[in-house]
Image: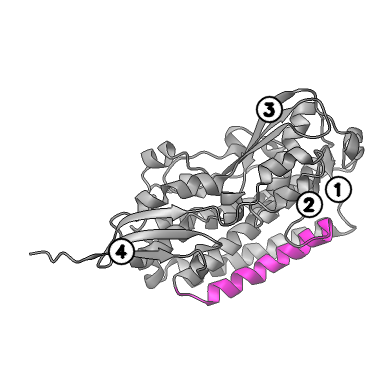
């Protein structure tokens, strides 16, 4: 005989440490079981797409930093690449290598923030400290080349803002060695931990069909067995020059998404290492990109997408031939990925909510935009 309890509505967020920003989940519960969940977004909405219409093409670049502020380099890149596509600009080879190195370092830093905060969410403090130790090392390298520690504003239409400082490539090579060694600690510290396995294995399962039908991308998609990565499937920049793997897992649970991100960090280290060996001398920006106030793509429209740390980020731009975009529309992976959350939570214990939500690695800056 089952006992039916009175339903209760519980608000989690918008001010809650495990919502990773101003995010609210309204859950209807019977006892400790979630019967219904309703994600509520919009608390961080800044009208980014509309702001683009009143800025020159170059002036909008810093605004892309504030989308997924954990992965700002890729946000910079995808926007600049969309404009380059419209203008038919050929980016100098050295600039492409610097772009790849900085983007992959930033991808690792983003995954480290996820790894540390996810473990913190479900009760482990030490991994958070280790993760931020290594992230800080990466931020030192990105600060040296861009002049900023989080919102880098480093990419430029046609190339990059500055060349690498003297000795920077060698310092990156040393950083790769340190990170590769430290990542073995992550496995030792966390991956086989019985408590962690109990909180993540078999929890928050996304089937391959659901992952595709909901339009998921990034580790959330690859953790459900879909081997799709734009760096491999639709190579952009110079990614076709590098040897790296696309990790996937079939289980589709929180642990599978954890394993995918851990392996992705190792693959990013491989890419950075190869790029540091292959980098060439030369210009760092196309001559048209140097005249930032004169950038006027021909009238038309384009869409460009790339693989960010959270998944596919895309930029749709409409030009009317003037020095300001007529329309900018952003495809933000966190916004798309979080849409599946309500169905994932239905029927689960309330104790699983934080573990499931955290496994999606959502940043509210690009959810609300």
Q: Which mark is residue 153?
A: 2
Residues at circles 1 and 2 in contact by the CB criterion of under 8 Å: yes
Badge 1 is on which residue?
A: 161
Quadrant of residue 198 within the rendered picture: bottom left
Q: Secondary structure at mark 4?
A: loop
Residue at screen point 79% across, 41% down: 55
Residue 207, how many percent across, how many down? 36, 44
Nearest the viewer among 113 and 69 is: 69
Query: Magenta segment, which residues?
Result: 123-148
Residue at screen point 87% across, 40% down: 285
Q: Residues within 10 Å of mark 4 (few under 14, many from 20)?
A: some
Q: Please check the rendered image and state whether residue 36 is part of the magenta-colored stretch, yes or no.
A: no
Q: Earlier in the sequence, mark 4 or mark 1?
A: 1
Q: Earlier in the sequence, mark 2 or mark 4?
A: 2
Q: Is residue 113 left or right of residue 177?
A: left
Vertical placement of residue 323 versus 40, above or below: above
Q: Earlier in the sequence, mark 2 or mark 3?
A: 2
Q: Which mark is residue 349?
A: 4
Residue 191, how many percent across, how many down? 45, 66
As measured in the structure, the alpha-carbon distance from the residue carrying label 3 to the one carrying label 1 is 24 Å
As measured in the structure, the alpha-carbon distance from the residue carrying label 4 to the one carrying label 1 is 49 Å
Residue 136, how many percent across, how many down? 70, 68
Nearest the viewer among 193 and 38 is: 38
As measured in the structure, the alpha-carbon distance from the residue carrying label 2 to the one carrying label 3 is 22 Å
Q: Which mark is residue 302?
A: 3
Nearest the viewer among 53 and 217 is: 53
Residues at circles 2 and 4 in contact by the CB criterion of under 8 Å: no
Quadrant of residue 171 within the rendered picture: bottom right
């Amino acid at each position: 005989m089952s006992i039916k309890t009175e339903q209760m509505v519980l608000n989690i967020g918008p001010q809650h440490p495990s919502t990773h920003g101003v995010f609210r989940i309204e859950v209807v519960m019977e006892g400790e079981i979630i019967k219904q969940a309703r994600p509520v977004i919009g608390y961080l909405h800044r009208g980014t797409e509309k702001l683009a219409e009143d800025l020159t093409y170059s002036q909008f670049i810093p605004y892309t930093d504030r989308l997924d502020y954990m992965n700002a380099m890729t946000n910079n890149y995808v926007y600049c690449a969309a404009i380059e596509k419209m203008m038919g600009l050929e980016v100098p080879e050295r600039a492409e290598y610097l772009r790849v190195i900085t983007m992959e370092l930033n991808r690792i830093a983003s995954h480290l923030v996820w790894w540390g905060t996810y473990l913190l969410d479900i009760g482990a403090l030490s991994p958070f400290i280790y993760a931020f130790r290594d992230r800080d090392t990466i931020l030192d390298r990105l600060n040296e080349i861009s002049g900023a520690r989080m919102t880098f504003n480093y990419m430029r239409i046609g190339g990059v803002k500055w060349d690498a400082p003297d000795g920077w490539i060698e310092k990156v090579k040393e950083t790769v060695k340190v990170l590769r060694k430290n990542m073995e600690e992550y496995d030792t510290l966390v991956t086989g931990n019985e408590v962690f396995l109990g909180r993540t294995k078999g929890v928050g399962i996304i089937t391959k069909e659901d992952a595709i039908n909901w339009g998921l991308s990034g580790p959330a998609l690859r953790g459900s067995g879909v081997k799709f990565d734009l760096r491999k499937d639709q190579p952009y920049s110079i990614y076709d020059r590098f040897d790296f793997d696309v990790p996937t897992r079939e289980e589709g649970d929180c642990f599978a998404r954890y394993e995918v991100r851990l392996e992705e960090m190792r693959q990013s280290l491989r890419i950075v290492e190869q790029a540091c060996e292959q980098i060439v001398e030369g210009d760092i920006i196309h001559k048209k990109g140097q005249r930032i106030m004169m950038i006027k793509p021909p009238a038309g429209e384009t869409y460009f997408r790339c693989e960010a740390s959270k998944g596919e980020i895309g930029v749709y731009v409409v030009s009317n031939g003037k020095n300001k975009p007529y329309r900018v529309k952003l495809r933000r992976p966190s916004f798309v990925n979080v849409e599946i959350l309500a169905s994932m939570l239905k029927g689960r214990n309330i104790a699983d909510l934080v573990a499931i939500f955290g496994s999606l690695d959502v940043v509210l800056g690009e959810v609300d935009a």
